[in-house]
Image (cartoon, grey):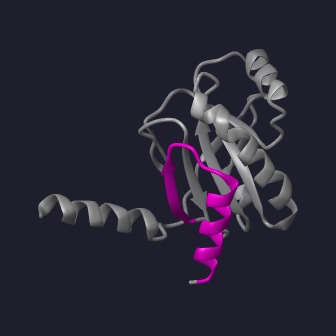
Amino acid sequence: MTRLFISLIYIIVLLAPAHAVEMELKGIDGSIQQLSDFKGKWIVVNYWATWCPPCIEEMPELQSYHDDYEKRGAMVIGINTELVGKDQLLGFLDDYFITYPIFTSPPIQESALGGIPGLPTTFLISPQGEIVARQVGGVTREIIEKFILKWEAK
């Protein structure tokens, strides 16, 4: 009974909008941006690594979503969480035709957005800057679209 109660609280916390969150984003070139620079859009924040097969598998879905929604108020931000050289990372992105914004981070288990228990981990940020969902494991374009439609219908 206690386990069920704890699980229900956990789900509610994940689905309830959290306060607007702020975090620094470090570009591949070392430049710094703020997550709030993108406020006003739906933001899909995806933590990933080049050695992660599920991360690589979901990248075409994320790229497709970004390409179709960037001019319509949504975007994808990738955060590479590994210690990899700039040239190696740029080569990987070129090989996989990834053009959405990519930032870097050392390997972490917790971010300003919440826990990162495994890769990939994806957070969905509302146009108001609130965390409204987290997915550990792969996502698809369809999952993102359906969640946003459901959220906006509330």
What span is in magenta?
A: 130-153
Q: Pick out the residue farthest to the bottom.
A: 154
Q: Quadrant of residue 58?
A: top right
Q: Pick out the residue farthest to the right.
A: 71
Residue 50, given in percent of the width and then of the height, sits at 64, 24
Q: Is residue 40 left or right of residue 122?
A: right
Quick check: is 145 in the magenta stretch?
yes
- On screen, 150 above or below 67? below
User: What residue lies at 58% left-to-right and 39% top-to-bottom?
Assistant: 47
User: What residue lies at 47% left-to-right and 66% top-to-bottom?
Assistant: 18
Quick check: is 137 in the magenta stretch?
yes
- On screen, 103 above or below 154? above
User: Quarter of the image containing the C terminus?
Assistant: bottom right
- Note whether residue 113 is visible: no
Q: Is residue 139 left or right of residue 17?
A: right
Residue 57, given in percent of the width and then of the height, sits at 66, 35
- Note whether residue 133 is visible: yes
User: Quarter of the image containing the N terminus?
Assistant: bottom left
Residue 3, given in percent of the width and then of the height, sits at 17, 58
